[in-house]
Amino acid sequence: MAFVNLKNKEIQVKIVYYGPGRGGKTSNLEYVYKKFAKRINTEMVTVKTHGDRTLFFDFLPFDIGIINGYDVKIQLYTVPGQVKYNATRRLVLRGVDGIVFVADSMAVRREKNILSLKNLQENLAAYKKSIFRIPFVMQYNKMDLQEQGIPLLPMPTLEKDLNSQLKIPSFAASAVLGTNVVATLKRIISLTVASIKKDLK
Amino acid sequence: MADSKDVDTLSTELENRLDDLFGDNNPAPADAEDNDTAAHYPLAELKNLILSIDWEITDDVLGKLLQQIKDLKLTYKHDKIVLTFLQILNSLGGYIQTNRAKSHPKTFKILNSVFSSLDKVVLSREMPETAKKKVIEHLNFIEQKLKEDMGTMQN
Amino acid sequence: MSYTLGQKQLDKIEDILKQDLIDNGVRCVFLIDMAGNIIANLDNGEKQHDIYSLAALAAGNFGAVSAMAKIIGENEFSLLFHKGQNENIHFNKITTEFLLITIFGNDISLGFLRLKVSESVEQLKIILEPLVSL
């Protein structure tokens, strides 16, 4: 739940990057952190396993500056993708304002994407939130693997599997190279802030 | 191969030893270093209560503390040093009970250090007269200072 | 979905935190919600921590510990406290939505801190409870 501080003229907003394990959620944040290092004064918090998999969450606070007189502070989080960390994913989703689903475009991950999206829907429902009503952007990640000859799911398939009912903005991306990482982020921020403004009226 | 008689002797000896260690009057096995600890440590309950206060302050614990101090005062009624310590602890306990969250933050540190000193005194059986005199003087000074400070703290 | 706090409410919150806690030797105190948003934070001027990271981790930590409590059949734990060599950290829930986190040195006893925190929580509840029903 976003918090509006009328005293400091500040809005704090929570955006969570969700998706199957090893899909690129952490890579998205790492790219943002590198690219905007000058803007971001703090370290990125990562709680990882020894094998470099996200264990608890990654966290990156991002101040996008003043909009309409309010200082908008975005807190970016990722969740651990591995199936066994569902309880943790649910925790991190608490109070979420906007979601980016980072799907893994590799053909072998088709099933995992679908299961992860379903899992997101269930976890949101636990907080009485509907996946259809929350600010939401879809990202089809790992497009860079095409060049390496790794079979990827074609766009129409991805859209049909994951976006046929949601009908939300989607981006083909490569978190590792940075392609459309910022575009995804910009879109989710504007959707989320718009939703809060509507709330405040 | 052990002779059955040897085994019997061993069993008896073992049983005797175990009786010595875990007999009715000795609640704990004797320490290799200090045989006196087999006897009941008189400040055990007081220590528990003081440690509890470090973690949580409730009416229950404070009540038990003051009662325990009262009981110990009887036990040590002929020991001037210990009595003085107990007096100070009693004042501190009463102050905390009355003032609770409004107590001066330092009170708890003082409570702990007074108990710690009392602990040392009780554990060290032999104390030379001169040292005893010094301790009594020092304690009287602390008691006076606390009376003054707590008077101002209450404001 | 969002919630708002106005100048008067935030001023009152800061007053409570300052008088009850900072003025009694607490090094740093922050009030957050369970999503990790920071509502108020005060420190005694000595050390500046990365409070955004602390807030995110604190909310996550508290959430994780609460989930563990439920698994073992407890409604919640009455004490969440981490002891360090020089600095300690204490968590206290306020209603179901907020957390008060205090960082303090060894010059304050935990028992005393818990008394002070209870007092603060009673006062903060008055301001925060109306928000929870939203």
Image: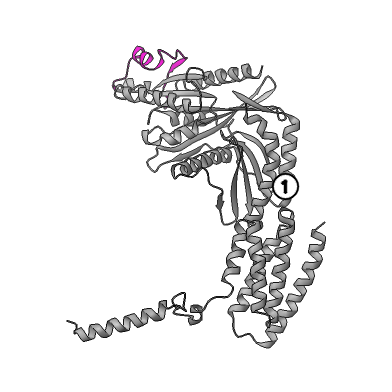
Q: Is residue A183 visible?
A: no
Tell me the residue at 79%/71% (across/down). Answer: B144
Mark 1 closeness class: few <14, some 14–19, many ≥20 residues within 10 Å: some
Tell me the residue at 73%/67% (across/down). Answer: B91
Res A151 → quadrant: top left
Query: Whole-percent x and y of residue B89?
Result: 69, 69
As helix, strand or loop, the secondary structure at mark 1 comes to helix
Residue extending furthest toward the bottom: B129
The amino acid beneath tag 1 is: Asp
The C terminus of chain B appears in which quarter of the rendering? bottom right
Q: Is residue C44 above or below residue A52?
A: below
User: Is residue A155 found inside the magenta-colored segment of the image?
Assistant: yes
Give the side of residue C21 with respect to residue A141, left or right. Answer: right
User: Is residue A125 found inside the magenta-colored segment of the image?
Assistant: no
Q: Which residues are magenta?
A: A149-175
Query: Whole-percent x and y of residue A201?
Result: 66, 16
Residue that mark 1 sits on: C20
Q: Is residue C106 above or below residue A51?
A: below
Tell me the residue at 41%/15% (across/down). Answer: A163
Q: Is residue A157 above or below residue C91?
A: above
